[in-house]
């Protein structure tokens, strides 16, 4: 089995340097190739790629900007392998990653898998707090952090594997972003392919974003979900509404203070206290615990508001997704 590692990049040569350096330390003793797809960047990484020509089997392609999903498809069409592994450019790969994937596929082959993400000690406090918000069982149920407590796992494209057979049958990613990875997972299920979580195939996901960019990112996640629910109503879940319920509940709690009823806000206080204590313990830092409260609030508020806006436009007003949210769709 030949692994082809597909990595789209946009204006982030430093990240590609870190990623390729981590792959050069891999303990995997079989051949694998790396396909770098430059998605119309003005700040190219071609010179970085050349630096690793003697260490890794790496190819570089430059194309016009068309988004990460289309860039991944482009890379898979260029790749030689029969199994593709997709990373975001802001990932750092543990040296045992490919060995873990090979072992997992040998024990229980699946045409599409996803792996969790973790934070390195070298990450900033804000990056660690955002990682906690995105991976903790107290926030997302641990889906991104390695939980298998759901019936069908939807791999995320920062750490995802896809067989050539599944890619050719599905035509890969669509042009929605974000949301292209659950869209692909559902289409694969409908085609008869299985997906699975490989909990030991984790990456260090750096997420080089500040608070404002994080808020914008999760807001787009919220907007994308009702679109996916509209396309695939059979996979709609009540849990998708939780962040919106969370925000509405907080607003209701503030309103009830007028009537001297504060029980609801007390429950919110307890929840955030638990978040603070657990993150502080897990990260061994009170500062990160404090930042985690900010990250979770921004996560729930951004996603919840985005979901509510999209639900109204898509599910109630029946607007076309491309017209309601053109910023979520790349033109091919």
Image (tube, rainbow, N blue to C red):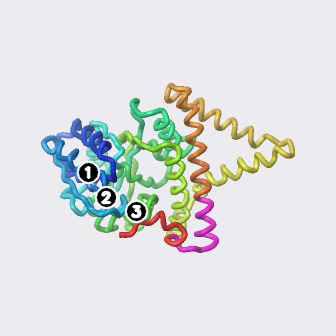
Q: Which residues are magenta?
A: 307-321
Please check the rendered image and state whether residue 311 is part of the magenta-colored stretch, yes or no: yes
What x and y, as percent, mark residue 329? 44, 66
Q: Residue at x 44, y 64 (%)?
A: 176
Please check the rendered image and state whether residue 289 is part of the magenta-colored stretch, yes or no: no
Q: Residue at x 19, y 49 (%)?
A: 58
Q: Real-space Cα distance between discs 1 and 3?
A: 18 Å
Q: Nearer the viewer, residue 183 or 213?
A: 213
In terms of secondary structure, where does tag 1 sit?
strand
The reply to whether callout 2 and callout 3 are in contact (CB within 8 Å) is no
Mark 2 crowd level (few <14, some 14–19, many ≥20, 10 Å Cα):
many
Circle 2 residue: 39
Q: Main secondary structure of the magenta part?
A: helix
Mark 3 crowd level (few <14, some 14–19, many ≥20, 10 Å Cα):
many
- Viewer-side label of 2, 3: 2
- Viewer-side label of 1, 3: 1
Q: Residue 166: tell me if it is visible.
A: no
Q: Is residue 65 left or right of residue 220?
A: left
Q: Residue at x 69, y 40 (%)?
A: 268
Q: Nearer the viewer, residue 47 or 181?
A: 47
Q: Which mark is residue 184?
A: 3
What x and y, as percent, mark residue 195? 39, 56
């Amino acid at each position: 089995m030949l692994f082809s590692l597909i990595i789209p990049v946009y204006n982030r040569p430093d990240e590609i340097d870190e990623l390729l350096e981590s792959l050069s330390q891999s303990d995997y003793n079989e051949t694998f190739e790396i396909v770098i797809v430059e998605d119309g960047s003005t700040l190219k990484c071609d010179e970085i790629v050349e630096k690793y020509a003697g260490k890794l089997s790496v190819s570089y392609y430059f194309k016009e900007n068309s988004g990460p999903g289309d860039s991944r498809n482009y890379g898979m069409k260029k790749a030689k392998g029969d199994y593709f592994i997709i990373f975001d450019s802001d990932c750092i790969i543990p040296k045992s990653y490919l060995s873990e994937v090979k072992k997992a596929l040998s024990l229980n082959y699946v045409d599409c898998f996803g792996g969790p993400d973790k934070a390195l000690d070298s990450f900033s406090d804000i990056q660690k707090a955002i990682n906690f918000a995105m991976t903790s069982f107290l926030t997302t149920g641990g889906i991104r952090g390695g939980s298998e407590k759901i019936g069908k796992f939807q791999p995320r494209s920062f750490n995802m594997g896809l067989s050539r057979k599944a890619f050719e049958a599905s035509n890969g990613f669509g042009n929605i972003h974000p949301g292209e990875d659950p869209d692909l997972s559902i289409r694969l299920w409908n085609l008869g392919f299985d997906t699975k979580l490989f909990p030991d195939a984790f990456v260090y996901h750096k997420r080089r974003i500040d608070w404002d960019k994080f808020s914008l990112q999760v807001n787009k996640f919220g907007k994308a979900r009702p679109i996916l629910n509209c396309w695939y109503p059979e996979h709609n879940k009540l849990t998708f509404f939780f962040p919106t319920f969370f925000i509405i509940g907080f607003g209701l709690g503030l309103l009830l203070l007028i009537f001297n009823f504060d029980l609801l806000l007390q429950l919110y206080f307890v929840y955030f206290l638990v978040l603070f204590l657990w993150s502080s313990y897990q990260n061994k830092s009170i500062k990160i615990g404090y930042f985690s409260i900010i990250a979770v609030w921004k996560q729930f508020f951004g996603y919840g508001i985005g979901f509510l806006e999209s639900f109204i436009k898509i599910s109630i007003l029946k607007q076309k997704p491309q017209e309601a949210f053109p910023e979520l769709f790349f033109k091919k």
